Image: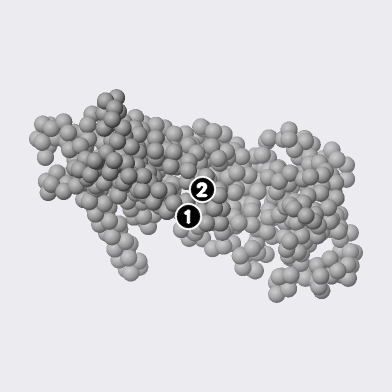
Amino acid sequence: MIQALWKFEFLQNAFMAGILIGVIAPLLGVFIVVRRQALIADALSHITLAGIAASLLLGKYSTFWQGVNPVYMGMGFSAAGSLFIEQLRKVYKHFEELAIPITLSGGIGLGVVFLSLADGFNSDLFNYLFGSVIAISRSDLMAVAIISVIVVIVVTLLYKELFFLSFDEEQAIVSGVRAKWIHFIFILLVAFVIAVSMQIVGVLLVSALMTLPVAASIRIARGFKQTIAYSIIFGEMAVLGGLVLAYYLDIAPGGTIVLLSAFILLFVLLVKRIKQWKS
Amino acid sequence: MSTSNNLIDLKDISFHYGDGNVLEDITFSIPQGAFVGLVGPNGSGKSTLIKIIFGLLKAQKGSVHIFGKKMSKFHDWSKIGYVSQKANSFNSGFPASVFEVVSMGLTSKLGLFKFMKTNDRKAVMDALQLVGMSDFASSNIGELSGGQQQRVFIARALVSQPEILILDEPTVGVDANSTSDFYELLGKLNKDNGITLLLVTHDIGTITDKVTHVACLNKTLHFHGETNEFEQFNERELSGFYGHHVHVLSHDHDHGGF
């Protein structure tokens, strides 16, 4: 493995991107889970797919778009989708969860239409759906790195506001936290992270990487910072282990990463249960 | 009362959501150092009044002065601590330690992009000490009892060292024993620490021996004055005000729910 890592640039790209995603996806995931918005990642990943499909379609007719990484169009769609969800939540005040299925099905519908028109039902699509070890280019890695730096800086700077808003929105607003702006910035970050994560984990599984490590962490952590730390550790274990398995077994990494996350979760639940049973 | 040492001054406040007034001609003030009990039945406009004080709702008529400044010119919200009735209706699985919950109270004092320093950490521990919860600093908030959680939320409101603390139905969902301990704590904060308090509640019987001033609200202000005057405000009038019989100064918690 180590030798292969030295030899193949595509493997280096995949692992470096994986290490970064293993930090930022669970980091944002903690805030999403405690706000009970776990499904928002699903909705946004489907919108991202529509964006990627749109980029492939444009590439069919214009040489300019062939040169543009489809991830950027995916990010654009994802960001627009996140704003759309916020608007829908306001329209359906008493049925806020409706925003998720509306966006999710809208996204997949658009994606299927664009892909059909672009004759895009091929191996590329398979990579976007379930992730890939070999499809990560240097320019993809750059996108992941830039987004990672932005996410870590913004979350660090806005940490106390994000934490307060997640715990008790009303009180946070009374204390002068500018909820609207912070929500807006946060959901944009989520949209970007989903767009850059999907080449490794795939559209259908990206939300799992944001929620499963957090679900395990929440059972054993004391305090919020520890919850974040454990989530990132579990996320890293799943991503790195999943990539190694995917490489050796020649399986799409989305599957191995998510299954590893699920195993970690089961293991944590089991250990916790045994501990409770002993005491 | 002279206006000079009033922390909060409401003058001729009227408010309506659609048709029909929720509040009518409310003139109400909180002098420095007072422990004001604002009582009234459910739906009497108590929460609306609180929202007006915090500028979350704007009264159609009347004026609000906070620390002698006009509402629109007042920005120093860290001077006002607030414990909402929903404070302990948070998701009890939320993975936050007691220390972290109290630190939230420093958010506006610190300001954007600022981090906690050693003296901020000390302020958090001091606030926990004050409410008798320092042994629980590293426990997760969801593991505590309702009464303990309520103390933590008081500590969160106190950590920025506010001059006035506003408590909106703070004992909802807290058992009777913890409730009376809780009022002891409020009495102590008022007397020993000189913190001005506004306690909003529908439960009039349990508070009257700790508060220094009482205000009775039901759309209009029925009574506003010092506690000893209030004791002469007879039971018959109160009954009319609440719509059924009321025992004033009853400390029997079975009579607690009006």
User: Is the N terminus of chain B in the top left, top right, bottom left or bottom right quadrant?
Assistant: top right
Mark 1, Cα crowd under 10 Å, few <14 / some 14-19 / many 20+, is some
Number of callouts: 2
Residue positioned 89% across, 64% down in the render: B233
User: In the rendering, at what x and y percent does residue B148 appear?
Assistant: 56, 59
Mark 2 chain: A
Residue positioned 11% across, 40% down in the render: A1
Mark 1 chain: A
Secondary structure under badge 2?
A: helix
Label 2 sits on residue? A88
Real-space CA distance between mark 1 and mark 2, rounded to the nearest whole angstrom: 8 Å
Label 1 sits on residue? A98
Mark 2, Cα crowd under 10 Å, few <14 / some 14-19 / many 20+, is some
User: In the rendering, at what x and y percent does residue B48 appear?
Assistant: 72, 52
Q: Is residue B119 above or below residue B153?
A: above
- Residue A234 as seen in the image, left or right of residue B186: left
Nearer the observer, A18 or A100 = A100
- Residue B10 as seen in the image, left or right of residue A87: right
How are the residues colored? one colour
Q: Are marks 1 and 2 in contact (CB under 8 Å)?
A: yes
User: In the rendering, at what x and y percent does residue A271 appear?
Assistant: 29, 61
